Amino acid sequence: MLCVRAWRGLSPLRTGAHLSAWKQTQSYTAAANLDLSGIYPPIATPFTAEEEVDYKKLEGNLQKYAKIGFKGLVVQGSNGEYPYLTEEERVEVVRTVRQSLPADKLLMAGSGCESTRATVQLTEKMAAAGADAALVVTPCFYKGKMDSRALIQHFTKVADSSPVPVVLYSVPANTGLELPLDAVLQLSQHPNILGLKDSGGDITRIGLIVHKTKTQDFQVLAGSAGFLMAAYCVGAVGGVCALANVLGPELCELERLCVSGRWEEARVLQQRLIEPNAAVTRKLGVPALKQAMEWFGYHGGACRSPLQALTEAETQQLRRDFSSNGWLLDDGSIIVCH
């Protein structure tokens, strides 16, 4: 299906711009055909004891994720500690993942930077490294000035230049800034903006975005496992869920139940996922996610400074949040109980 969305902001072709226009056409066609539906873990970045990226352990995780029914992977999202990586490291991690990822799995790469110029440049590098789509977070350092006008201009310039489709990324817990609804609705008309990852958790907002963009082929992804079922209920097509790094098969099962309309079974599973999900996201964050990954047979390890390891009390709380919901045996040992 070719893209039917029209974007009034595009300029007519000018002499010498034919190659650029051709690239835009290829990107826009890709956006029209790329189906995001499914579950994606925003993968963690393993580090060595010296805080270098541990590519061997990363590849070990990738081999295990390849056996799970994910639609693809999100690389260099918030759970990948992207603000603490250099640009070169961010690109190299994406390149490494693409080399190990099965060809039928999508790779969404986080390319957001604070300036539009830097985001455009990094997005091009992520595409060259093998990304199928760019996940672009809202710039937030000057959040008092990041109103709809500024953000629409930012994302439009990025999408105009990007060789791959763009997915908007709103994560107010980390940025202190929610991508305004009017900005989302205007940007949804851009033929190279494919969808939105919404991590805010406001189901009313998610449902309204789905409703208001239903003629735009615009795809909405839930940004957390805690409200995945609710997001499916109002029209989301999938989820980018930190908990999928730990309980990937279970998140894929929840997706299957929702898509097939088995809501009672989905409700039971969703309820069991709420507490462990909260523990590895808003409550204890990336250090908890990495600790839980270790328990469940993945390579999590330490975070890059200044993120700190969990305290003993936090570790015990994390264990309780998993064991009380039946994901770990609560007998003092760390045993997976699927």
Image: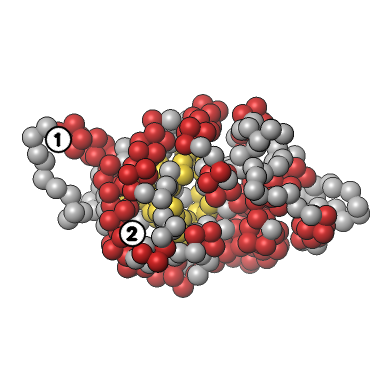
* Distance from Cα at disc 2 to Cα at disc 1: 26 Å
At x 36%, y 49%, the residue is: 115
**Which type of secondary structure does the marked residue at label 2 adopt?**
helix
The residue labelled by disc 1 is 17
* Residue type for callout 1: Ala
Vertical side of 137 occupied by 102: above or below: above
Task: Compare residues 212 and 317 and report the one nearer the observer.
Answer: 317
Crowd band around label 2 with a 10 angstrom C-alpha radius: few (<14), some (14–19), many (20+): many
Q: Earlier in the sequence, mark 2 or mark 1?
A: 1
Task: Compare residues 257 and 314 and report the one nearer the observer.
Answer: 314
Query: Which residue is at the far bottom?
Result: 204
* Residue type for callout 2: Leu
At x 58%, y 48%, the residue is: 79
Q: Identify the mark at residue 151; answer none if there is no mark.
A: 2
Query: Where is residue 270 drawn, in percent x and y?
Result: 64, 62
Task: Compare residues 228 and 117 and report the one nearer the observer.
Answer: 117
Query: Which residue is at the far left?
Result: 15
Query: Where is residue 95 drawn, in percent x and y?
Result: 49, 29
Looking at the image, can residue 239 be seen?
Answer: yes
Of the two numbered discs 2 and 1 in the rendering, the one whose residue sits closer to the viewer = 2
Query: Where is residue 239 drawn, in percent x and y?
Result: 52, 54
At x 43%, y 43%, the residue is: 111
Vertical side of 61 occupied by 37: above or below: below
